[in-house]
Amino acid sequence: MHFFKKEVKDIFVSNDSGVRDNNLPSSLKRKNVYSPIENAPKGGRGLGLKLLQSLRFQRPSKESLKMAMEGKHDPKEEEAVDQLREMLFLDGKLPTKFNDYHTLLRFLRMRNFDIEAAKDAFLKFIKWREDFKTDTISKDFKFEEKEEVKKCYPHGFHGVDRYGRPLYIERIGMVDLNKLLQITTLERFIKYHVSEQEKTSSIRYPSCSIHSKKHIASTTSIFDVGGVGMANFSKPARYLFTEIQKIDSSYYPETLNQLFIINAGSGFKILWKALRAFLEPRTLAKIHVLGHSFVHELREIIDPSNLPTFLGGNCVCSEYGGCLHSDKGPWNDPDTLALLQVISSADETYDNEKESDFAPKNDLLENTQKIQALEEALEETKKKIELLEIALESTKVILKDASGRIKDLRS
């Protein structure tokens, strides 16, 4: 069942001059592409300065916290979320941890507001988390080889874009896959990727929301592919790419704001034709493939202070050994983290209260179902008794008739 459709816009991949890529398959020329998940109509709920100031000096109410962290709601989207929430709740498939507006909205957007399809995607997400043990990965999994891995696979979060979203960077052209596999395994690297996704969802996005005073729920990414070509797409590379793409697309949908692929040479452009076959249209819509003239485009959305010098910015992070080792961002600010802890604690209390509120409703529903079943059984028993009474009356008539005949025979 489709709930509603948004206005669509073109998918495009730009070259150095910003010209649209006309080589995209016709099936991908127009797809439903939604505005960034943070955007909503004016006048909705938002994280205001006065609220932030009040949170620092007093225990906030549970309602103010929920309004602060959830941001603005689109009325039509909220109606769809409520409908999905009701379906999951009635089936007993809605964990309290994920009973929030934006988590459900991401799965609705992922499936173009087809409620049944969004429900199916959400249930697969819950099953995957159980199988992958995602809820405890931050506690149970330690990636001790992280700094060594970064030397042969340069990547990391570094600051925010002009809107306040986390900025993620990879220098794919400098990846030494053979050395990477001497340091770690593909399975451990995928677990590390999931643990970083969890940190982004639970710490980076909320911290950026507090810091920018508005809801943040997506990432701006830059991939430097200088020197990358078909020779780089080995069997291990294909496995890593497809597994990470499947996880991100299926279980962390709508968390990519934009991806800028820079320093794309002729070798990568050949590879790109193969790579985009693995990507969904909604993801392709957010990707911009650029050549070597990319600085202007990046500076339009990212302040130079948040861009490393190798991307045309001013930052070097020498005290950390380079920008991609710093994990620079609001998520490392002590005041922001302290406030986030207050919010998380209050939200946990609120969620427990909600769960307690639901318990009597669940008991009432269960009791109602039991009563209904007993009433049905009672009606069935009454029918059987009526049939037995009819049969008994018939038996009495037969016996009476037989008794009369016996008397006649004796006389």
Image (cartoon, helix red, strand yellow):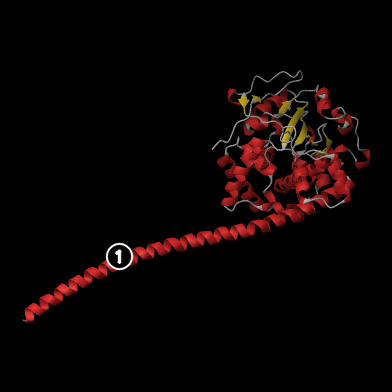
Towards the viewer: 120 or 46:
46
Instruction: Identify residue for label 1.
Output: 387
Residue at the far right in the pictured view: 319
Q: How many numbered markers are drawn?
A: 1
- Residue at 22% x, 71% y is 395
Asked whether residue 327 is in view, the answer is no
Instruction: Give percent across and percent down for residue 245.
Output: 67, 38
- Residue at 63% x, 46% y is 125
Towards the viewer: 186 or 287:
287
Instruction: Give percent across and percent down for residue 142.
Output: 78, 53
Quadrant occupied by the N terminus: top right
Say above or below: 121 vs 224. Answer: below
Task: Tell me the SS state at disc 1.
Answer: helix
Instruction: Give percent across and percent down for residue 27.
Output: 58, 25
Instruction: Give percent across and percent down for residue 51.
Output: 84, 43
- Disc 1 crowd rating (10 Å Cα; few below 14, some 14-19, many 20+) is few
- Horizontal arrangement in the rendering, residue 227 relative to residue 338 (left or right): left
Say above or below: 124 vs 220. Answer: below
Towards the viewer: 67 or 337:
67
Which of the 4 image quadrants contains residue 285? top right
Which of the 4 image quadrants contains residue 190? top right
Quadrant occupied by the C terminus: bottom left
- Residue at 45% x, 62% y is 375
- Horizontal arrangement in the rendering, residue 104 relative to residue 312 (left or right): left
